[in-house]
Image (cartoon, rainbow, N blue to C red):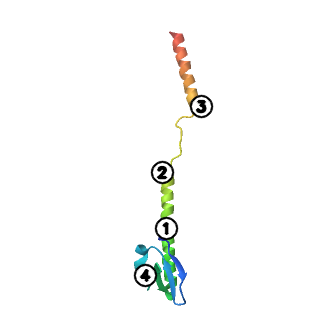
Amino acid sequence: MDQESCIKIESFNEHYILVYGNKEAYTSQICSEGGEWFDKLDGWLVPVKNKSKIELIANIARNTRILLQSGSNYARKSSNRKYHRAVSEDEKSDSEDEKSDSEDEKSDSE
């Protein structure tokens, strides 16, 4: 998620607060709290009495963004596997020594 998904709240005057955010994502929620979109301000004007509800919407949006980011980080980490060797170098050299010893024994017996 990007910064556009955040909601920013500023004081406009004693009666209204100015709310910035993604218009498509939050229009229905903010308008239901008495907000009106103003193109010149590129944001919503919301009555001060509804500030706590707008802050709640902003907190939910922020927490949702954090949750989605942490979920994608978890998925990314789980898909990254560390390299594990099936056989260590010491085991390979031991098995090669055994093979050469057994080949020597076979050639001696022939």
Q: Vertically, is 107 above or below 39?
A: above
Q: Mark 1 and 3 residues: CB-CB less than 8 Å, in contact?
A: no
How far is the residue under mark 4 from the one under mark 3?
A: 71 Å
- Three-letter code, disc 4: Trp
In the rendered structure, which disc, 2 or 4, sits on the residue that comes first in sequence?
4
Q: How would you rate the neighbour count of disc 3 (Cα within 10 Å): few for under 14, some for 14-19, many for 20 or more?
A: few
Q: Vertically, is 35 above or below 109?
A: below
- Element carrying mark 2: helix
Can you tell which mark lies on residue 90?
3
Can you tell which mark lies on residue 37?
4
In the rendered structure, which disc, 1 or 2, sits on the residue that comes first in sequence?
1
Of the residues tagged 1 and 3, which is closer to the observer? 1
User: Percent from the top left, x then y, of residue 85?
Assistant: 53, 38
Q: How would you rate the neighbour count of disc 1 (Cα within 10 Å): few for under 14, some for 14-19, many for 20 or more?
A: some
- Element carrying mark 4: strand
Residue annotated with mark 1: 65
